[in-house]
Amino acid sequence: MLAKMFCLSTSSLSLNTFFPVISLLRLLAETEIRTRIDDYKPFIPGKMNVNQYCWKEVRPLDVKASALAMRALTYALGIPLRLETLGEGLTAGGLQVKRFDFFPRSESGKGAFHIVRSYWSSTTTPEPLEIGSGNLISSDGTPLLTLLCRPDNCDILYRK
């Protein structure tokens, strides 16, 4: 009984530790979306305006982060991101993975800027981008941060 109580309090303590960090990241994504309304408005689903979308889909902690919110966070932090999502069907006995590469704007004009590439992993990978140093991009032109998103979960993928 005591062990169960200890485990519960430890796990709730760690969750409470991360809530402020997650809240801050969601606030940064929301700020990016609200600051650059014209860039994001075409991608907002349904008949919601930007404020409604942020209130319902970006700010709440109990809502799964959308690709649009991840893209906004990528741009707000200036960190390139590869988002990999599992496709609906099987091809040649394997799953298809759709890749989205998000590259943030460059205020200095150097390196990659405001680029989104999407392609199926089974197709040829786009040509590597010409980039400067310090862009958090590997030598083959792909973002160092990769998330694999499945219907109920997102995981960080690490390179060997």
Image: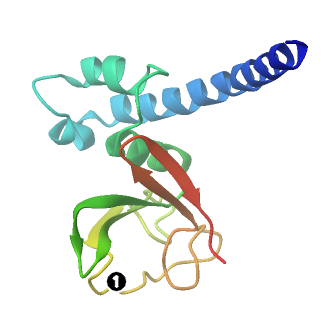
Q: Position of residue 41 (x, y in %)?
A: 20, 36
* x and y percentages locating residue 60 in the rendered image: 44, 19
Q: Quadrant of the C terminus?
A: bottom right
31 vs 119, nearest the viewer? 119
Residue at image point 39% right, 27% down: 58
Q: Residue furthest right?
A: 2
Label 1, secondary structure: give it. loop
Q: Residue at x 63, y 76 (%)?
A: 133
Residue 68 location, x and y as percent? 33, 42
- Res 140 seen here: yes
Looking at this view, name the residue that lies furthest to the front. 1
Q: How is the image coloured?
A: rainbow
For the N terminus, which image quadrant?
A: top right
Q: Is residue 115 left or right of residue 45?
A: right
Q: Name the residue carrying label 1.
A: 125
Percent from the top left, x then y, of residue 48? 16, 22
